[in-house]
Amino acid sequence: MKATSRSDLLAWLDALSEQYTVIAPRMVDGELLYRPVHASDEVVLDFERTRLSAKSYLLPETEVILEIERQEGQVTLGEPRLDRDQVILLRPCDARALRALDALLLDRPPADAYYADRREKTSLIGLACPQLWDDCFCTSLGSAPDDASAVDVMVYKDGDAHLVEVITGKGRALMDGLEAEEVERPTPHSDRSGEQIAVLAPEDWPGLFDEAYWHQLAERCLSCHACTYVCPTCRCFDVRDDTTAAGASYTHIQRLRAWDSCMASAYRRIAGGHNPRPDKAQRLRNRYYCKFCYSPSDFGAVACVGCGRCIEVCPVGVDIAEMLANVAALAKGRSA
Amino acid sequence: MSREIQEGIRVQARELLGLGEISCVIGYEQGPKGRVRPAFVYDQAGTDRLVWDQTCHHNLVVYLHDRRKGGKTSAASRVAVVARPCDVRALNVLIHEGQVSREEVFVIGVACPGMAEGATLQAHCQRCRERVPVFYDALVGEPARVKLPADDWSDVAELEGMTPAERLAFWSREFDRCIRCYACRQACPGCYCFECLAEQVDPAWVSIAHGLSQKAFFHVMRAYHLAGRCVECQACDQACPMHIPLSLLNRKIAKEVEALFNYKAGGDPEIPPPLATFLKDEELPL
Amino acid sequence: MTESFEPRIVGFLCNWCSYAGADMAGTSRIAYPPNIRIVRVPCSGRVDPLFVLKAFQEGADGVLVAGCHPGDCHYGDGNYHARRRYALMHSLLDYVGVDAGRLRIDWVSAAEGNRFAQVVAELTEQVRELGPWAGRQEREVAA
């Protein structure tokens, strides 16, 4: 464990930015977002949660996954790669969320080459939360505001100063530029108090699939994509060949991968126009089943970290924590 | 004031559901964390859930779209909807455009004191010229005896005062934050297309790329499609998770429609919408 | 702006009047700037404002929408509708930062070859003075 002052911590980020792209919370036109920082005085260290997660630095909103150059009958293919290693300062839940992305995109061969490239070139510095914020429920999902299990380095707040703990070898490689004093201190603990929500095990979900509750829950849903786009674990994408995006033309075709949302009515539409999930209740149900049933049973990771963002941004108050509690009660009612 | 309205809504809802003429009352309830949200009440017992305060900013008329789309609320004949004056204007637009029939909706009109954040009325409520809905089947609350200010369009004028380059910079910065969640569109009572141009595949007007120009294209086009139809309820602003001032865009169109065609959206059904008609001899700035 | 800047202008011309007017300019050997790329449409009323926006998005520096003179529409009233639409579109585009001078709506009959050339020349010069349109798509993709 190392102890360091706030100014030394920021100086460390400046030092890191010589070798890495440093991505950290900063204010962008009134919103707190994870964004590349140019100087450490832009970095916001005391905050609750950023409006968006950090997933866009590993699975960008849009990325070119293939470039097709057509010239004089010749076709050449190019595969863009991230050209600079990156360091992301983020909340522990946002780091933990990457496990759900790893489970789908990395762990089982064949790995997604673009994601794997970014993941390998990314180091994570966790900024422990001192407590659970409004809408947070990470402790109900086996985590905690100071969960260091998914980061390379963990930073805890210690009065006006900070404690820095190296978690992985990747993290150790970042430590050179940090002015800090080695101290013998136990790992600090955050305040974990907050409502505990019972989360059903994956095998308990299929029996509830036909409950009327899903229609009741979805009635207010507007079918916008806000929850899926702010979610740190939602990872669905669409792929299209594009000749109209910037940098593309009829001789330079780009294959784009861009975020997509299962809340959209067109998401599941197939050739010929059939749509197996035409109703918004089916779509909302699917989103939750994906997170708590399909993802853990198919890929081994629950795709929710309890960050509370979807609760915060939903324009009509659809609340995933309320849903979990209601579903647990439904299951209990059935077994009784 | 809010208490009276809340009580009025509950009384109306109880009565309507008791008579059995209405299958569902769409109103507001308090969510688990204290935020007000839309509520769907199907029986008298549920009417105690209904609340009203000055944070009830959702335009509930948007849920009438679901009836067209075969959603849950279409199951039974008639629904009641709690509607503020701006919501009723939106309903009026839907009725004119043949999307909803007047007979299938019971309007619990609210004599609206305006929406507020803390003690301050929201901007669109400060300039609201209509504190009682243009029509209703029942009215709750007492119309506030306040002098209604004229809309001076000062917010729009501020942007108009800039140079084109400054305006481009302004909107680029705002649209750059857009995450393409389409919450603005989904919360908008005027946006009811089965397939939005933003999702059309052939032709693909908007690329799947989350780029600035795609976002700007979408927002400008949406604003244009709301010409003579935007009722200034500000549901889009309220829904936007990135706080993009979308109504500032829509209001420019509303201002021009009023200036050029002397037309206000959601008003008199006898007046044809401005883009569905023309005058042969009109002089327009081209 | 730069000396070498040549504006790219997209012209949506109605089949019955303005396209024929352009033809007239051609067959009469009237010179006009080659900056315009013409898209023939059945009627100015067919020119969805979407087309104009798309043209600006994909790199047009200026757009011309031209149709029959009011009263002369082949279909009766297409140009009356276009007139209303573009009166609005003009102010909306200006409001989001597309200089009003980049979009021109005009009426050119099949006999007005001279007028067509003049409209194109005026628009081209106007757009040349405004410079390249800065709002076209850029930095779309995190590569």
Image (cartoon, grey):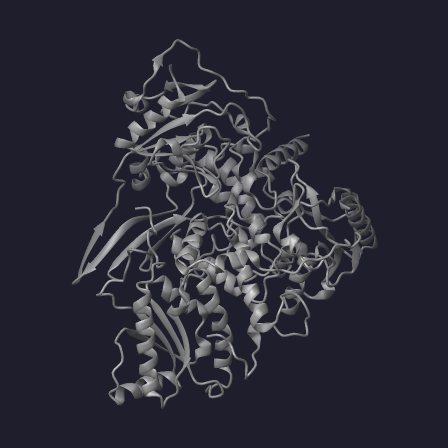
Residue at figure coordinates x 22%, y 51% from the top left? A77
Above or below, A154 relative to A218: above
Question: Residue A155: x, y in percent?
Answer: 41, 22
Q: Which residue is depicted at the point 62% across and 66% down?
A: B265
Q: Nearer the viewer, residue C133 or A34?
A: C133
Give the percent coordinates (x, y) of residue A209: 58, 42
Which quarter of the image is occupied by the N terminus of chain A?
Answer: top left
Query: For this rendering, which residue is in front, A176 or A298?
Result: A176
Residue B118 in the image: above or below residue B124 = above
> How many discs mark residues in the rendered view?
0
Which quadrant of the figure contains the C terminus of chain A?
top right
> Residue most toward the top?
A184
Q: Position of residue B196 (x, y in %)?
A: 50, 61
Most distant residue in the front direction:
B161
Closer to the camera in the image, C37 or B159: B159
Q: Is residue A194 above or below residue B217?
A: above
Q: Is residue B204 visible?
A: yes
Judge whether A188 appears above or below C19 on screen. Answer: above
- Residue B231 position, x and y percent, is 62, 61
Q: Nearer the viewer, residue C27 or C43?
A: C27
Quadrant of the image occupied by residue B53 = top right
Residue A50 in the figure: left or right of residue B274: left
Res C60 seen here: no
> Measuring 26% from the left and 89% from the top, which residue is drawn there?
C27
Q: Is residue C82 left or right of residue C131?
A: right
